[in-house]
Image: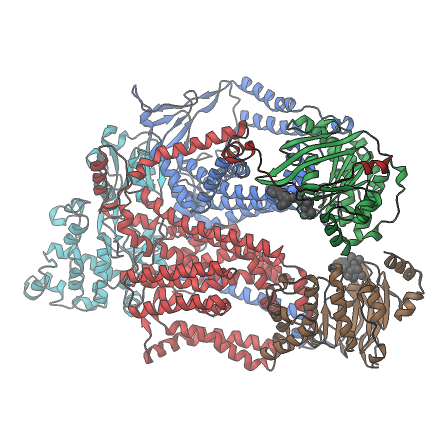
Chain colours: A cyan, B blue, C green, D brown, E red
Amino acid sequence: DTLADVKARGELNCGVNTGLAGFAAPDANGNWTGFDVAICKAVAAAVLGDPSKVKYVPTTGQTRFTALSSGEVDVLARNSTWTFSRDTDLRLDFVGVNYYDGQGFMVRKDLGVTSAKELEGATICIQTGTTTELNLADYFRANNMNYQPVNIDSNAEGEQQYMAGACDAYTTDASGLAATRAAFADPENHIILPEIISKEPLGPAVRHGDSNWGDIVRWTLYALIAAEEYGITSKNIEELAKSSQNPEVQRLLGTTDNLGAMIGLDAEWAKRAILASGNYGEIFAANIGEQTPIGLARGLNAQWTQGGLMYAMPFR
Amino acid sequence: MADVSAPAEPPFRLSMLIYDRRYRSMTFQVIVFILVMAAAWWLVNNTIRNLAVLGKDFNFGFLFQRAGYDIPQTPIPYTSDDTHLRATIVGLLNTLIVSILGCIAATVLGVAVGVARLSNNWLFARLMTVFVEAFRNMPLLLWILIIYAIFTEILPPPNAYRGEDATASMIFFDNVALTNRYTAIPTLAMTNDPGSLDLGARITFNWATIAFVVVLVGGWFVRRAILAWAQRVQDATGLRPRTWVMNLAVMTVPSLFLIFWFGLHLEAPELRGFNFTGGINVQNGLVALWLALTLYTAAFIAEIVRAGILAVSKGQTEAAFALGLRPRRTMKLVILPQALRVIIPPLISQYLNLTKNSSLAIAVGYMDLRGTLGGTTLNQTGRELEAIVLMMAIYWALSMIISAGMNIFNARVKLKER
Amino acid sequence: MSEAITREIDRSQMRISDEVAIEIHKMNKWYGTFHVLRDIDLTVHRGERIVIAGPSGSGKSTLIRCINRLEEHQSGRIVVDGVELTSDIKNIDKVRSEVGMVFQHFNLFPHLTVLENCTLAPIWVRKVPRKQAEATAMKYLEKVKIPEQADKYPGQLSGGQQQRVAIARSLCMQPRIMLFDEPTSALDPEMIKEVLDTMIELAEEGMTMICVTHEMGFAQAVANRVIFMDQGQIVEQNSPREFFNNPKSERTKLFLSQILGH
Amino acid sequence: MSEAITREIDRSQMRISDEVAIEIHKMNKWYGTFHVLRDIDLTVHRGERIVIAGPSGSGKSTLIRCINRLEEHQSGRIVVDGVELTSDIKNIDKVRSEVGMVFQHFNLFPHLTVLENCTLAPIWVRKVPRKQAEATAMKYLEKVKIPEQADKYPGQLSGGQQQRVAIARSLCMQPRIMLFDEPTSALDPEMIKEVLDTMIELAEEGMTMICVTHEMGFAQAVANRVIFMDQGQIVEQNSPREFFNNPKSERTKLFLSQILGH
Amino acid sequence: MSETHAQTVAFVRDTMLAPEPPPVAESGAVKWLRENLFSGPVNTVLTLLGVAIIWFLVSHFWDWFAHSVWNASSLNECRQIIIETWGEGARGACFAVIRERWNQYMFGFYPSALYWRPTMAFGLMFVALAPVLFSESLKIRRTVLVVTAVVTLWAMVQLNAPGAWLVFAAIVLVGGLAISERHVSWLLIFSVLYPLLGVWFLWGGSLWGPIMVLVGPLLGWAAWTLVGRFSALLATVAAIVVTLLWWLMFASRAAADAEGLLSLAIPFVRSDQFGGFLLAITIGVAGIALSLPLGIILALARRSDMFLIKSMAVIFIEFIRGVPLIALLFVASLLLNYFLPPSTNFDIILRVIIMVTLFSAAYMAEVIRGGLAALPRGQYEAADALGLDYWKAQRLIVLPQALKISIPGIVSTFIGMFKDTTLVTFVGLYEPLKSMSDAVRANIAWKGIYWEPFIFVGFIFFIICFGMSRYSMYLERRLRRDHR
Ligand SMILES: Nc1ncnc2c1ncn2[C@@H]1O[C@H](COP(=O)(O)OP(=O)(O)OP(=O)(O)O)[C@@H](O)[C@H]1O
Ligand SMILES: Nc1ncnc2c1ncn2[C@@H]1O[C@H](COP(=O)(O)OP(=O)(O)OP(=O)(O)O)[C@@H](O)[C@H]1O
Ligand SMILES: [Mg+2]
Ligand SMILES: [Mg+2]
């Protein structure tokens, strides 16, 4: 029973990337920040009452799922794509999507390429051991094109190769491309091609078989998303908790109905989760949004009310 | 006087299991063996229980599923539609390629450097020392990364070869292009292609290749015969006939004939689209890995060679000189045969190390066994237990083959002593 | 160890011709700035047997190593068998095939059998057919009394046997001059005798020999001349009888008193 | 080397009791298929001093190594001080602490000082307190006349001194029987005397000793009995006087002529 | 004619010749050049080649080095400074990243207020090593310890170590120095205690843990002496059983209880905060310290004449030596959880240390086996003849000598292992070379910096490994002299 374990331990073990700008990276003092890290903090706040009670377990592409299935981590929030086989064969449960991504290509402007369809025969840098590798193979196969893959081990290597012109195009999730491009000395000389060749719904995962724990993580994520939808922010949450008349908000913040009890938590769980690093929109804006160096637009990740896909199930 | 009669075997007592030397070691061995077996059983039992808890099984069936990923450099035909098994084999072949190339180059370079360190050229000996110390005292991973980065940073991208105002030009009579992705080398083409031998599973050998192999192997045997003949002549007359002309001819004449017969010629790579095509593009991952392994291992081999030569005492050289042998003959007849005995065993273990170290290939994206089976396949199928067990078994088998070779060699050249 | 010498040699049987075998004239040698050999003058006639003695570090080894150019001298002349030693390789080869050398530590080739040790140089330097080289080798192995060891490896022999193989190996090149550098000093006492016997036999046959040794019994029994060296120079030269009974120089006296007192 | 023996021993002072120290009965030993020791019968009384001689390879070393079970015998019996040597570890331990052994190559422990060499076994085997062990050790080091070397390491001593340390080390276990395996044959001639003197002193005190040696002077001076071995068998056994002056067997005569002639 | 002939050449030197300087052509710089650089056509070519290589390297990399920037807070700032100072298009290194992230490269994510703790542990390690590694020569020992003491204390002051601990470190360092002057072997006690102390300094927590670990062998020893009166074998068994029982059943509880009574705790630091060279050195040192005893046991087993024992040792050693370390690290991170009882989970660093230990133990066993084989048979026989049993003989006679002979091999195994700690990057630990640099690059300020971290990390590795290899060469020469 993961919940009991976590409570007994007094600490949430959260699997994260070893270092991906915007999503999860330790700073010089070992403090973790990032879009995925915020999920860990929210869950810890909901379950343990303290967003800092997280032990971050850096995982590589190879070790991430094993770390989860062996019980080394309780939640895996490591920009992992939700796929059929991972959900079934690997015995994981993806509990939701915190970022709708898609695989794209980045090329130099002076290459004169404007579409991925023009990449016949190109050399393409790709990180090994990810779904992108499979997508790329499928895409070129489907379009009857040839390409030369350059397998690289980490994002840093990929950037370095791409910068030196060792590959014509660099492919990874569009969010990663944007982050990478942002760090270039000359971002204007690089373009991200319009084709998005895959769906990459990234989301936190838990072990298969512990549905209650899965529910906690899932609804913590939804709480963050819903909070944005209802306009609950870390600034106004205390006030809304006292004064909001919206029954949906009241239920969410535990003013009426003790939803938390149904998942083994107390009434204020969602409030704490939102307080940890703000609602979904705040987290987005603080880590990867347009004001950050990474500068991602909300796009698909806008609320459903804004034409995006972020849609929290009702708290009822 | 003590009464000394014929010794009667004392009857067996339980305490003899501990106090009698004959039984004591048995007892000890049995206890340790039981403990070890118990530990092994414990591990296996845990594994079985863990697999059950996770709802997994131990099953190599995933090897026959579609792999779905591409591999940059494939010695045998491979597409993403092939199975994980074939990807594994591709990875193994890639491991073998870089290991064998590395062993050869490291030996050549290592011997050269080892000898150069003994040279009386002060400057060169010092330079070689710097080389050896630099490579021995920094992690191999660092060298792999650095060399790979040097390749990408220093060499021009393919499109630098493009157009009128190309900033780079091909070398070796426009046959080879060095780029920061790969080295484009010409392929061998034939005007008179004899067709291929199909071994099934899309593995083919061109008859021409087979013909060349036959010629080379045959040539090697003929060469041995020539050497034996030269030895016989020398034994009989004392004068050793010159054999190098014949030796050269044995290999080259048939080869030249075959080249002519098949109309063999080079087909230079050409820049088309983004990349060079028409030739063979040797990935920089391979070249950088190969170079790093070579340099790193060569530094160790150099030390082994140096120690081996130094181990042959100065007295041996002097004795040979005093008998009137020239330096070259002394090297060949006296120093080398003795030095080799000292050199070969650690040399082989360097080969072992090189083979194992080639598993760092992933750092430069070269898809070796660890990159395919232990990397992407493991990752895509989630079969970590099976994949790692299989991978370790393969590496272990490689090592055993190499060290078995070493033991045979050692037994053959062991010095006879009192 | 004078008891090791079993027979008194009939010196009258040994012929010394007037022909000069080795001529050394004002030869000097330095190691770096260290002056090892100073103004060496020495003439050896064919058939002479010369023993060189002297304290450790006096340059005895260096002197005889210069004679077959294992070391280079820096000034003066060395003429062996009419050939002057210069850096001309041909001359060096000529001299080396005339001069045999036996080392203190034998320096046999451990990877070759005794027979192969003995035939190596004849085959590769003298270009003798193997059969013939082997026959010669067996002849000399018989002379040193170990023909039955021909197929063993040096490592399997005792020290005395090894040194005798070394002597046979040198003899196989049929040299006209033999140099010995303390051939018995690395041997156990029982084995010294075997080797000295072999050397005495050689001496009886009239081989020109220069021998660095501290076996004074041997010197008295076979040498025509004893040369005493100190500090890189020849301090005294005399017949063995005179040398031992009536040493002239102070240094020689001191040296002899140490050696014989022991 | 009879000049090494300085004093003639007053034999009347040495007591040989009737008590049996070592009893060997029909003992046989093989190395693989090679029959090294054949039907050895030997009784040694307490206080006896026995010298074993014989050509190389005759099994002398093997015999005395069997007595403290460094080698295992395959048939027959060996009873030391009433304890029969079988593969029972307790018996072996008992015998080894009664029997001291001195090797040809000393086998001192180079990483320990002389004093530590001597106290090691008393402390760890006999469980003697360190202080007491050191006092005993100093006593025996004085007996072998090198107390001043106690804090040096074996590598800093001469061969003769090392061998005397080895003797002292054995004595520190206060054995009732001492075995010596060619204790002087690895020594330079000057040093042999020191060691022999020490052994003679031991003999005078009535220690039971079995000594493999070729020092015939020593044998004549101290032995009660000389045993001559050849091809793994005891060929002759006699008092030293009879043995040297009147050898019975042909082999003994031949052997003596070689040894003494040399 | 012969006799008379000898008479005619009689010669006595009355005045000894004085040594003379060698002829000009045989000395001085000219000779040196001729002999060492231009002694033949081949040599001349080699010399020119050497000069060409040096020229190539200098001309290509010098200005990059010369234009280094040491003070900037981001890569862009570096680029700006270089352009400002040396003009458009100038290339230059940006070593400012090292300056900025120095602490991270050294200590990983270790709490900065506690940096002094690993520093102290590292300094005290030299005191613990003094009797083992530097026992040979007083001079070296003195130099090493004085330098260690000064550097450690200085660094601790810089890192704001609390006064009490400064005093503690000073006492141990100076005390160690004083003791090592006369009785190095006394320091062996410290060497034995050091692993526990080191673990405590690095990870912190309660001192009672290490103390209770230590109590195990003490109880074992008590049991051994008690039972030893009856039977040596039983005593050994009793000692082992008591020790293990204590460790497995009681130690942790006793530590907790004792902590409740009297708190001896310093702040606890979790393994995941280890990184950089601290991690590399921790894994390296722990690996070597643990693999040494294991290697000894394996080596003894492999030389044993008991068939089963021997074959098990051979199988283990050959298996470990046959697979790449990276595969074993994968076992540590991916498979170890399968092999242990369900839902046991322990520290990844610990798991990696276990695998690294097994790996180097196999190599260590081979090194020690060489040392054992080099020991003359006479030593075994003398030990036997004195009545020492197998274990006493091994402990008192054989191992002290064999280990000493093996020190050079052990040191080079350690160098290899230390370099191999970089591979833990593949299991997600922050070793300095790749993971730490990647982590630094994951920060927007340093994204895109590539060469400088490599050069820096390589340089540190070089210093450490080169120092150790020189030291082991020195030992080798010394041993050769001693063992003539
Ligand atoms: N290669 C060398 N370089 C420098 N000095 C040398 C060299 N070889 C010998 N020497 C020095 O030259 C001197 C003479 O050496 P040599 O070996 O000829 O002496 P030796 O009379 O043979 O002594 P020994 O009786 O010990 O063999 C010694 O002082 C020695 O140290
Ligand atoms: N470990 C062994 N294995 C096989 N044969 C051995 C072994 N040790 C000794 N031998 C053989 O046993 C025979 C007797 O050896 P031993 O050492 O007892 O002779 P020894 O009389 O002491 O000779 P020495 O005077 O040379 O010491 C010899 O032929 C020897 O080769
Ligand atoms: Mg000399
Ligand atoms: Mg013997």
Badge count: 0
Q: Is residue A148 visible?
A: no
Which quadrant does the N terminus of chain B fall into? bottom right
To which quarter of the image does residue D19 belong? bottom right
Reply above or below: E387 against B360: below
Residue located farthest toward the front when viewing the structure as drawn:
E14
Reply above or below: D138 against E65: below
Which of D222/E88 is in front?
Answer: D222
To which quarter of the image does residue D257 belong? bottom right
- Left/right placement of residue D32 relative to residue E22 reads right
Reply above or below: E116 against A96: below
- Ligand 2 resides in the quarter of the picture at bottom right
Q: Is residue B270 visible?
A: yes
- Left/right placement of residue B21 relative to residue C11 reads left
Residue A264 percent location from the top left of the image: 23, 68
Which of E422/B91 is in front?
Answer: E422
Which of A23/E66 is in front?
Answer: E66
Residue A103 percent location from the top left of the image: 26, 41
- Left/right placement of residue A24 relative to residue C138 reads left
> Residue at point 80% right, 78% down?
D46
To which quarter of the image does residue B180 belong? top left
Residue E264 percent location from the top left of the image: 33, 74
Residue E141 percent location from the top left of the image: 47, 60
